[in-house]
Image: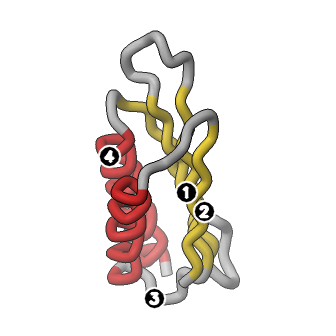
Amino acid sequence: MLIKINAINFEATTRLEEFATKKVEKLVKHNEQINIVEVNMKVVKPETAMNKEVSIKLNIPYQDALFASKTADTFEEAVDMCIDALKRQLEKVRKDK
């Protein structure tokens, strides 16, 4: 699985990238065919609260890509919320088959 992490409008720390990578790798338990994961982290209007936006896109062969985008006070919280949303989507796809 290839994981691409993009930091927009800020410089991501190694700790933050490792956190996101560790969380994303756990999605393989729900679908082993995930081949590319794109994680985009962005700071929106730095002077306000709830300004950390994370979007995650999962590319799975032979089906539509899954996508989740969340905004929170911290990037870690936004990543957790995206992962939870993607887990629900993966479960729904599995049940539909």
Q: Amino acid at mark 1?
A: Val
Marks 3/4: CA–CA distance = 24 Å
Q: Position of residue 84 (x, y in %)?
A: 32, 55
Q: Earlier in the sequence, mark 3 or mark 4?
A: 3
Q: Quick check: marks 2 and 1 in contact, CB under 8 Å? A: yes
The quadrant in which residue 20 appears is bottom left
- Give x and y (percent) for residue 68: 51, 49
Label 4 or label 1, whichever comes before in sequence order: 1
Inter-mark Cα distance, 1 to 3:
18 Å
Neighbourhood count class around disc 4 (C-alpha, 10 Å): few under 14, some 14–19, many 20 upward: some
- For marks 3 and 2, the one nearer the N-term is 3
Residue at the spot 60% in from the left edge and 66% down from the top edge: 4
- Residue 51's quadrant in the figure? top left
Marks 3, 4: nearer the viewer = 4
- Give x and y (percent) for residue 67: 57, 55
Can you tell which mark lies on residue 76? 4
Q: Which residue is mark 1?
A: 39
Amino acid type shown at disc 2: Glu
Disc 1 or disc 3, which is closer to the eye? 1
Q: Is 42 placed left or right of 13 in the picture?
A: right
Q: Secondary structure at mark 3?
A: loop
Label 2 crowd (10 A; few <14 / some 14-19 / many >=20): some
Q: Are marks 3 and 2 in contact (CB under 8 Å)?
A: no
Residue linked to disc 2: 38
| Residue highlighted by disc 3 | 32
